[in-house]
Image (cartoon, grey):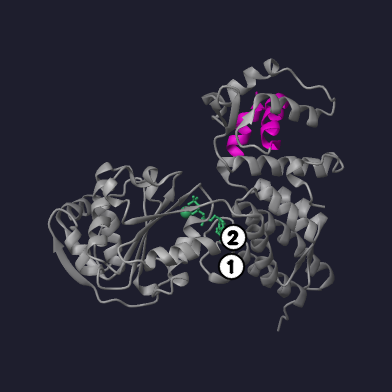
Amino acid sequence: MDSIDPKRAAYINFLAKCDQAYRPFSPIDLPEFFAGRIEHIRRLEAEIGAPGRHVALYGERGVGKTSLAKLAYFFLRRNEEQTHFVRCEKSSTFDTIFRDALASAGVEVMLNGLESEGERHGTLGLGPIGIRGTRRVHRTFRRIVADQQITNRVLLDQFAPSDGLIIVDEYDRVTDAATHTRMAELLKHFSDAASTTKIMLVGVADTLSQLIGEHESISRSVAQIKLDRMSSEELGEVVSKGVQHLEATIKSGIATRIVRLADGFPYFVHLICRHAARVAANQILESGNTGVVISEDEYAEGLGGALSNAEHSLRESYAQATITTRRPSEKFMLVLWSVALSDERDVQVKDMAKNMAFFTGTGTEPKPGSFNWNLGELSGDNRGNILAKVREGYYKFTNPLMRPYIRSVMELENIVYHGKQWEFPFMKGAQ
Ligand SMILES: Nc1ncnc2c1ncn2[C@@H]1O[C@H](COP(=O)(O)OP(=O)(O)OP(=O)(O)O)[C@@H](O)[C@H]1O
Ligand SMILES: [Mg+2]
């Protein structure tokens, strides 16, 4: 009988644990890997516990909204079975959202309009709808017949008496204006009826009204919880929870560098740690020792891997902005790096000039006029609007994830080609 090489087995086991610990592309769904957010959880508990209060959870792209929403049942000590998670799409409407929520609760809705649409496309068979996710429960389906729409009454009858949670994620994607009005009315109804099932709307937005529109009637029934970028401590916790799960160690200076690069976004911590840990896994093959260590070499190689596997949109957008007739253009790159170096998010043109001198090492700042044209191009369609003009003389990255991405590019370049000569201000204090 073939015996499995124990080193190989340990290596494979380590990689499998790495997939669980560092997951840049999916939300956290196990409490043991969820880091930080203590204040937000406290707020959520207080608001959901308050009679008549529902919640809108919003913030920038990628800050961790879905992860918090997915684990809300756990933090709020509610029954997972009575938690109904609906993910919106561009084409979602009030009826499709709540048809899904009802299906998750074991209620099959026979809607005239929807049914005929289902027949036309042959996709919307409303049989016992497969409950998404990992639910292991068998439900008995109840069938109700509604007229043209799912009414507030139907929803109240179904949900108001139970201690449930209806989570509507990616609500910002819904384009149908009538849905927003109907949602506002529903929230008010749930509130007035003191429903113990609570609704949680989740999505990318800067403000509540950007997420749900202007509806005065709901300001009392909906609590606003804005999810900010993560603090350094919270990001540090993301690193360490993963490392603990792997039973590995990371040099503290390296953990700090990863946290600094991530710029508040847990995505980058997961991405870099995942790749660095996978590189470190080779130590198991080499020595058979499972106590792997992530230090400078694993970090540098992992950073390279992280950049080549970063979100497609980031890589594409950076390439489109910097490549001219198939070759990288130094000037465009330098402008973007000078924006990424700044501590400010809205970067003044004269600071960019100062930052350019940091990279060129000449000590002479270029005249703003010499790169004005590049700035115009970088904030135009030709170069994918990578920058946006905030006001006269100020620019910022259109996608907030671009700053950590470019900072990571700069860091890798610094390690590989510049013998770590550059001391980036955003790395201050990290060894
Ligand atoms: N509290 C947390 N602890 C550890 N990792 C987290 C936490 N929150 C989010 N993450 C990680 O960060 C990344 C983004 O998380 P998530 O998908 O929840 O963000 P989001 O705000 O819903 O993003 P989007 O705006 O794209 O929908 C994922 O890799 C996720 O695993
Ligand atoms: Mg999300």
- What residue is pinned by disc 1? 33
The residue at 71%/41% (across/down) is: 409
User: Which circle marks residue 298 in the picture?
Assistant: none
Image vertical order of residue 261 relative to residue 397, above or below: below
Q: Are marks 2 and 1 in contact (CB under 8 Å)?
A: yes
Q: Is 55 left, or right, of 310 in this rendering?
A: left
Q: Amino acid at mark 1?
A: Phe
Magenta region: which residues?
315-342
In front: 386, or 311?
Answer: 386
Does the image show residue 55?
Answer: yes
The residue at 82%/55% (across/down) is: 296
For disc 2, the neighbor class at 10 Å (few under 14, some 14 to 19, many from 20) is some
Spot occupied by residue 68 in the image (x, y as percentages of width and height): 49, 61
Farthest-out residue, top = 369
The residue mark sitting in front, 2 or 1, is 1
Is residue 326 shown in magenta?
yes
Name the quadrant of the N terminus.
bottom right
Is residue 340 shown in magenta?
yes
- What residue is pinned by disc 2? 23
